[in-house]
Image: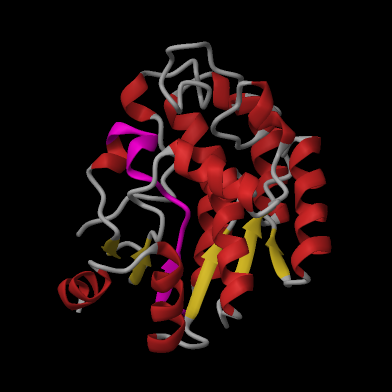
């Protein structure tokens, strides 16, 4: 099925990909947004297409104030429901009580433990029962993402993943934002190309990798939280 979908999407632009998914997987599609600029582009397209896709976000409890700002702006502009998924309260209480509020700085294992509790487990609940998961992933965002494809099979979550703007450049995204007056996170104007939890995100310097500001204290090759580990 993955090869067939990929073939059918090959000549389509991003908006037509959104329409294709809605026609083929109506009421069986879910979109995850973190309110970054790529996700804002997808939200705009979903609204324009009148898509039946459900939209959700992962409320980790450690987001930037600016993220809540653009979340509110998005609700105001598009009038689309965005379901928030929170971490399991008992799991967070146990982690913080045992290791403190900043254990993720101490080791990769601790950081992945925090990511699992605050992001992976809530994600698994959010996508359960759906056939297709739409994301705002672009190939040039990181070396790991260059190895992905516009359509993939996520073995761990047993779901088809489709990335409508996979081949877009950052310039494409920014141009689309401006042309369509799409609300976006003001941190993007302050050197934050990739925005996650506040303690784990910093601005990047000129010439640094797109995701250099995420988990900056770790080795470059480990710059994924586990949300997007897929197989073609």
Q: Residue at x 46, y 37 (%)?
A: 170
Image height check: is 75 above or below 147?
Answer: below
Q: Quadrant of the C terminus?
A: bottom left
Kindly give the residue lying farthest to the top in the view shown: 206
Number of residue marks: 0
Position of residue 139 in the picture relative to residue 16 (left or right): left
Image x and y of residue 182, in percent: 68, 52
Image quadrant of residue 46?
A: bottom right
| Nearest the eye: 49 or 27 | 49
| Nearest the eye: 34 or 180 | 180
In reply to whether residue 139 is colored magenta, the answer given is yes
Q: Residue at x 74, y 67 (%)?
A: 78
Position of residue 195 in the picture relative to residue 67 (left or right): left
Query: Magenta residues?
Result: 130-143
Image x and y of residue 63, in percent: 72, 39
Position of residue 147 in the picture relative to residue 91 (left or right): left
Image x and y of residue 186, in percent: 73, 33
Q: Quadrant of the N terminus?
A: bottom left
Q: Residue at x 56, y 39 (%)?
A: 114
Image quadrant of residue 192?
A: top right
Image height check: is 168 above or below 88?
Answer: above
Image quadrant of residue 86?
A: bottom right
| Nearest the eye: 221 or 113 | 221
Image x and y of residue 6, in percent: 22, 69
Image height check: is 3 above or below 65?
Answer: below
């Amino acid at each position: 099925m993955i090869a067939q979908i990929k073939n059918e999407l090959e000549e389509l632009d991003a908006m037509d990909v959104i329409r294709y998914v809605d026609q083929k997987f109506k009421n069986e599609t879910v979109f995850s947004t973190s309110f970054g600029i790529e996700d804002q582009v997808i939200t705009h397209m979903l609204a324009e297409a009148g898509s039946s896709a459900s939209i959700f976000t992962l409320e980790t409890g450690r987001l930037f104030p600016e993220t809540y700002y653009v979340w509110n702006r998005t609700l105001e502009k598009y009038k689309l429901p965005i379901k928030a998924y929170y971490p399991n309260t008992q799991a967070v209480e146990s982690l913080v009580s045992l290791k403190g509020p900043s254990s993720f700085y101490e080791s990769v294992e601790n950081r992945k433990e925090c990511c699992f509790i605050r992001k992976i487990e809530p994600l698994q609940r959010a996508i359960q029962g759906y056939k297709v998961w739409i994301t705002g992933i672009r190939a040039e965002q990181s070396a790991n993402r260059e190895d992905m494809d516009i359509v993939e099979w996520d073995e761990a979550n047993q779901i088809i993943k489709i990335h409508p703007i996979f081949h877009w450049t950052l310039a494409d995204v920014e141009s689309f934002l401006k042309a369509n007056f799409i609300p976006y996170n003001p941190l993007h104007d302050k050197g934050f190309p990739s925005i996650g939890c506040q303690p784990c995100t910093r601005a990047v310097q000129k010439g640094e990798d797109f995701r250099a500001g995420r988990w900056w204290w770790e080795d470059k090759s480990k710059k994924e939280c586990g949300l997007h580990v897929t197989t073609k």
